[in-house]
Amino acid sequence: MPENSNEFQGRPIAVLGAASGIGRATALGFAAHGAKVAALDVNTSQLEGFAEELKTAGAENAFCAAADVRDSSMLNAVLNQTAAELGGLDHLVFTSGILRVGALADMAEDEFDDVFAVNMRGFWIAARAALPHLQSGPERRKSITALSSAAAIRPKASSGAYAASKIALSHLVRVLAVELASSGITVNAIAPATVDTPMTQPFMGETSANHGYRLSGTSPMGRIAQPEDIAKACLFLSGDASSYITGITMPVDGGSTAAMPRT
Ligand SMILES: NC(=O)c1ccc[n+]([C@@H]2O[C@H](COP(=O)([O-])OP(=O)(O)OC[C@H]3O[C@@H](n4cnc5c(N)ncnc54)[C@H](O)[C@@H]3O)[C@@H](O)[C@H]2O)c1
C-alpha cells in the first residue's frame, strides 16, 4: 500500500493483542494512515501511554482498554465500547496469542488448554463479538484478520499444542470466510515464521530452557521478520487491494515454508 494512501483515514479499527510485538506494530501501522484505533490487550500495563503514541503517529482517534480473549462477556463489552468511541468498527485484527513449549508427552493439561483458549477459542469469540458492529454501519470494506503461524503449515517438535491451535484457527478462518462471504466481510489469516518479538526473544541464542523447541531461524531471504513486516500484511488484508481475497492463510515468512532449504 502506498505510504500516502488514505483508505484507512478515519476508519474504526480494533487490534486485539496490541500491547506487544505484531499487534503493537499493526496498531501503529493503522495509526500512520489516520485510522481510529482501539488498542486492546489483557496486559494493560504495557498499554499505558500507547493511546498518545498512536495519536502522535497519526491516528485520528485512539484509546486503549483491557480485553482478555478468554472472556466473551469482556470481549462483548470492549467491542461495544470500541464501536461507541470510534463510531463503528470496520476492521478487527486478532493478534493475541501465547506460545507454550515442551514435548507433548510432558506438557501439563492446563498449559495445553490455555494455548487453545487464547489462540483458537479466543479468535472465535472475538470475531463473534465483533460481527454485529462489522455488519452494521456504512457498506464499505470490512475485514477480520487473524495471526496464525507457519506452525499451522509445518509444525515443529516441542510446540505441538501451539501448532494444533494455529491450524485450528486457520480452519475457523476458512469457515467464517465462507459464512460471511455474501456480507462482503473478508476473513483471512497470516502465517509468519520467526518474528523478532517478546514471544520469541526468550528462544534467541543459546538457552537451557527451550524444552527442545527451536526457532525457524533465518528465512531464505537472510533475516527473520520484524513486526512491521507482518503489520504491513495486516494492512494489506484489511485494504481495498485484497477485497476479493477471503478464507486464506497467507504465509509472510520470507520463503521459510515454500521449500526445504538446500542441505
Ligand atoms: N513472533 C513470532 O515469531 C510469531 C510467529 C508466528 C505467529 N505469531 C503469532 O503472532 C501473534 C502475535 O505474536 P507476537 O510475536 O507479537 O507476540 P507477543 O507476545 O509480543 O504479543 C502477543 C500479545 O497477545 C497478548 N495476549 C496474550 N494472551 C491474551 C489474552 N488472553 N487476551 C488478550 N491478549 C492476550 C499479549 O498480552 C501480547 O500483548 C500471536 O498470535 C503469535 O502466535 C508470532
Image (cartoon, helix red, strand yellow):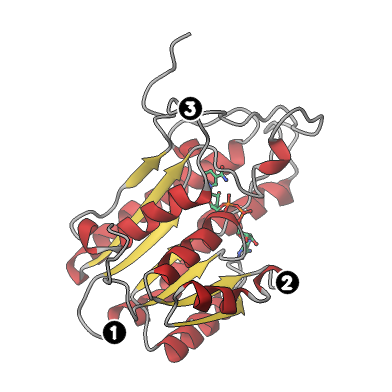
- The answer, for residue 95, to whether it is visible in the render is no
Residues packed near mark 2 inside 10 Å, few (<14), some (14 to 19) or many (20 plus): few
Three-letter code for the amino acid on which mark 2 is drawn = Ser
Q: What residue do we see at 48% from left, 67% from top?
A: 27
Mark 1–mark 3 CB contact (< 8 Å): no
Residues packed near mark 3 inside 10 Å, few (<14), some (14 to 19) or many (20 plus): few
Q: What residue do we see at 32% from left, 52% from top?
A: 174
Mark closer to the chain start, 3 or 2:
2
Can you identify the residue that label 2 sits on?
A: 45
Labels 2, 1: front one: 2
Residues packed near mark 1 inside 10 Å, few (<14), some (14 to 19) or many (20 plus): few
- The image shows residue 68 at horizontal and vertical percentages of 62, 70
Q: Quadrant of residue 206?
A: top right
- The image shows residue 120 at horizontal and vertical percentages of 51, 55
Can you identify the residue that label 1 sits on?
A: 136
Can you identify the residue that label 3 sits on?
A: 222
